[in-house]
Image (cartoon, helix red, strand yellow):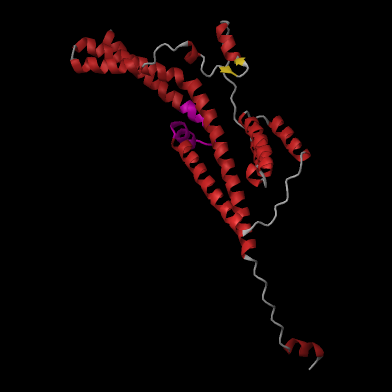
């Protein structure tokens, strides 16, 4: 038997058992994983909130006049029917239909959504000056803005702070990040990224005691429940439900709804013409 054959026949040493991580180490890994999962969830909820706000604004500005026109036509049709029949039930329906039509707004209501912290928006100034009102600027964050937003939130999220002062600093910074993202401002997000990199580095996380880690997990769970409630409210809202029907092309959804409303307006106008003709 050759030496190599003898070596092959010798029993191989069994690998020794690997040391099990301590309970504190396993708990620490669980806390870190829960923190990252919560941050990802917060990013998703905030992104959807921005999309819902933008879609709600566009929906109101583009389709609001058609909804108002439909309400007015419904009221006129009900009033025409009541005038023809004189029936008490028809009169009641006419009063209810007329009550749905929005009355002339007060000054504060008239300019709701037209006044910001710096005064009148350009659209409102144009309206008061008798000029053509330009369509409102459409704000939808680009893919690049979404990427920058996610990166900044992952780096600077307040939940990664180790003390109250650091949490406050991160919270103020993330508030500015959210504002830039809501405006779809890629340049501002880039500048914020440079600012964060130039600022004080995040503190190194020290191994926590088991009791502190368990308390941290409980807080993370409570925070997740709160975010889940916010997400559910957004998703079940009228605007959120519409947006989920066409998340990739909300503009096309608005066009389809607008076409349906125009058809309904035409039908009601024809019906009213029959009654008063």
Residue at 61 percent of width and 30 percent of height: 182
Indicate whether residue 3 is drawn in magenta: no
In the drawing, does residue 255 fall left or right of residue 19?
A: left
Residue 277 sits above or below residue 263 on the image: above
Residue 160 in picture, x, y percent from top left: 66, 46
Residue at 69 percent of width and 42 percent of height: 166
Q: Quadrant of the C terminus?
A: top left
Residue 61 in picture, x, y percent from top left: 50, 20
Q: Which residue is at the front of the view, 49 or 230?
A: 230
Q: Would you identify the image quadrant in which residue 42 lies?
A: top right
State which region is magenta: 237-256
Residue 77 sits above or below residue 172 on the image: above
Residue 91 in picture, x, y percent from top left: 23, 14
Residue at 69 percent of width and 33 percent of height: 189
Tell how many labels: 0
Residue at 49 percent of width and 25 percent of height: 59
Q: Main secondary structure of the magenta part?
A: helix
Q: Residue furthest right?
A: 3
Residue 99 in picture, x, y percent from top left: 33, 16
Residue 104 sits above or below residue 216 on the image: above
Q: Quadrant of the N terminus?
A: bottom right
Indicate whether residue 254 is drawn in magenta: yes
Q: Residue furthest top?
A: 130
Please say whether residue 249 is visible from this viewpoint. Answer: no
Please say whether residue 206 is visible from this viewpoint. Answer: yes
């Amino acid at each position: 038997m050759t030496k190599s054959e003898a070596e092959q026949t010798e029993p191989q040493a069994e690998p020794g058992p690997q040391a099990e991580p301590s309970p504190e180490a396993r708990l620490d890994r669980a806390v870190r994983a829960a923190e990252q999962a919560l941050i990802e969830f917060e990013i998703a909820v905030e992104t959807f909130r921005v999309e819902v706000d933008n879609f709600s604004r566009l929906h109101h500005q583009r389709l609001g006049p058609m909804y108002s026109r439909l309400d007015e036509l419904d009221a006129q049709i009900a009033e025409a029917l009541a005038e023809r029949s004189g029936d008490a039930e028809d009169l009641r329906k006419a009063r209810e239909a007329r009550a749905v039509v929005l009355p002339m707004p007060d000054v504060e209501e008239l300019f709701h959504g037209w006044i910001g912290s710096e005064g009148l928006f350009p659209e409102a100034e144009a309206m008061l000056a008798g000029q053509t009102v330009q369509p409102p600027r459409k704000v939808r964050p680009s893919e690049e803005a979404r990427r920058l937003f996610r990166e900044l939130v992952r780096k600077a999220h307040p939940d990664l702070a180790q003390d109250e002062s650091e949490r406050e600093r991160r919270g103020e910074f993330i508030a500015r990040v959210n504002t830039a993202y809501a405006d779809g401002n890629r340049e501002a997000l880039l500048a914020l990224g440079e600012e964060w990199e130039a600022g004080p580095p995040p503190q190194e996380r020290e191994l926590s005691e088991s009791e502190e880690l368990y308390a941290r997990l409980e807080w993370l769970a409570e925070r997740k429940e709160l975010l889940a409630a916010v997400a559910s409210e957004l998703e079940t809202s009228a605007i959120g439900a519409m947006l989920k029907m066409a998340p990739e092309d909300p503009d096309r959804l608005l066009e389809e709804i607008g076409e349906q409303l125009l058809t309904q307006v035409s039908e009601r106008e024809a019906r009213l013409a029959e009654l008063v003709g």
